[in-house]
Image: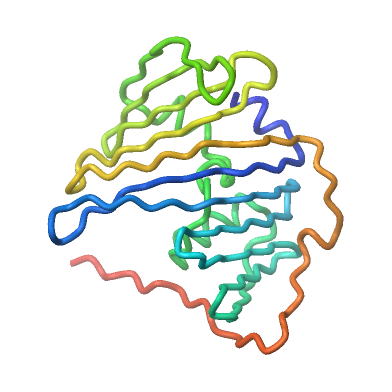
Amino acid sequence: MIAFMSGSTELWVRAQVSYQVLQETGQIVHFDRMHAISLARPDRLFWETIRDDASADSVWFSDGVLSMLKRPDNVYAQVELPATVPEMVDELVSVYNVRVPLSDLLAGHAREIFITGPIERWYIGQAWVDGGWTHHMALRNEELDFEVWVRSEGDPVPVRFAITWVHDEGAPTYVARFRDWNFSPSFDDATFRFTTPADAERVEILPVPIEPEY
């Protein structure tokens, strides 16, 4: 899976995500969102996130410039970042605290996640997921429990992820189901080019201050 994913120069995928948040009342509430991701290595990326409250983010990255549009607020921001997608994603997450869908995979951390990082690994067995057989694996590190289901026939792509933060209150869980993997998409320059919408207001993306250690 790692070799296949890292060897693809272009890809498009949709991910249906559900996650849970522990409320102050003690009740766990579930939320959904949809991601659509277009990637052309090494330096172009587009993604769109649609939430279950109908709000949406669209993000374009090319030529070292990231543009983000938030709807329905109709506000946008632009920031210069490192020119390649892995470096850009790392800086966007660590410096600006922007949530990037599948950030570890886009940043090229798949080997660290699956091979060098886990403390424990188990092969659960074959599992039928979304119309096909998969290899179901479970992994664990010091911070979280992680499961992945990888298609066992055809392209070895992940079809499902599940992450549980076992040490956080309520043990929140994040589950992603991947749909419609396409490794020969028909991208053109417009896919990754941002055009400012009419009447959109520009705002700034600011670095998140780091608290000093004493």
The residue at the point 70 percent across, 49 percent down is 38
The residue at the point 69 percent across, 62 percent down is 61
Q: Percent position (x, y) of residue 6?
A: 66, 33
Q: Percent position (x, y) of residue 129?
A: 51, 22
Q: Quadrant of the C terminus?
A: bottom left
Q: Percent position (x, y) of residue 21?
A: 28, 53
Q: Quadrant of the N terminus?
A: top right
> Who is closer to the viewer here, 109 or 147?
147
Colour scheme shown: rainbow
**Residue lying furthest left:** 25
62 up-or-down from 15: above or below: below
Q: Quadrant of residue 23?
A: bottom left
11 up-or-down from 34: above or below: above
The residue at the point 69 percent across, 69 percent down is 65
Q: Percent position (x, y) of residue 104?
A: 50, 44
> Who is closer to the viewer here, 187 or 54?
54
> Who is closer to the viewer here, 112 or 198?
198
102 up-or-down from 147: above or below: below
The residue at the point 79 percent across, 59 percent down is 191
Q: Is residue 47 left or right of residue 102?
A: right
